[in-house]
Image (cartoon, helix red, strand yellow):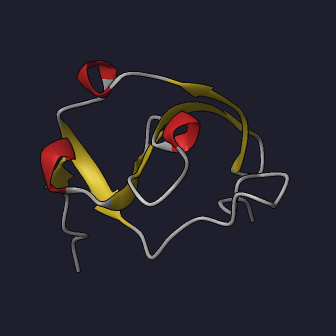
Amino acid sequence: MPTTQYKATEIEVGFHPDGYRIDKTASPMNRYTKWEIDPGDYWTHPTPVCFDSLPVSGWLKSDGFDWDQADGGQGA
């Protein structure tokens, strides 16, 4: 079954397979971030980005991220 993909404007909390995250429930520095994805699918080294630099489409919704985990709550 195909996964539903969304536009960035439709996301409250979600991620893009190219290493971007939107979390409008997080602190301002963590709202829009770009991550490096290491082998094993660990998301590391988050960098804040502006909304306009995010991919327009291809987003997946998420229930949330655990920002206290070393991999930002996204790893294996």
Residue 10, picture quadrant: bottom left
Query: Does residue 31 appear in this view?
Result: yes
Left or right of 69 on screen, residue 47: left
Residue 25, picture quadrant: bottom left
Taking the view exactly as shown, the residue that stands out farthest to the front is 28
**Image spot of residue 38 (x, y percent):** 75, 37
**Image spot of residue 26 (x, y percent):** 52, 54
Residue 2, picture quadrant: bottom left
**Is 17 located above or below residue 47 in the figure?**
below
Give the mark count.
0
Front-lying residue, 22 or 76: 22
Q: Measuring 55% from the left and 48% from the top, which residue is drawn there?
A: 27
Q: Measuring 31% from the left and 19% from the top, which residue is drawn there?
A: 53
Front-lying residue, 5 or 2: 5
Query: Does residue 19 appear in this view?
Result: no
**Image spot of residue 63 (x, y percent):** 45, 76
Left or right of 5 on screen, residue 23: right
**Is 11 located above or below residue 19 in the figure?**
below
Quadrant containing the N terminus is bottom left
Taking the view exactly as shown, the residue that stands out farthest to the right is 70
Quadrant containing the C terminus is bottom right
Left or right of 14 on screen, residue 8: left
Q: Measuring 80% from the left and 60% from the top, which residue is drawn there?
A: 68
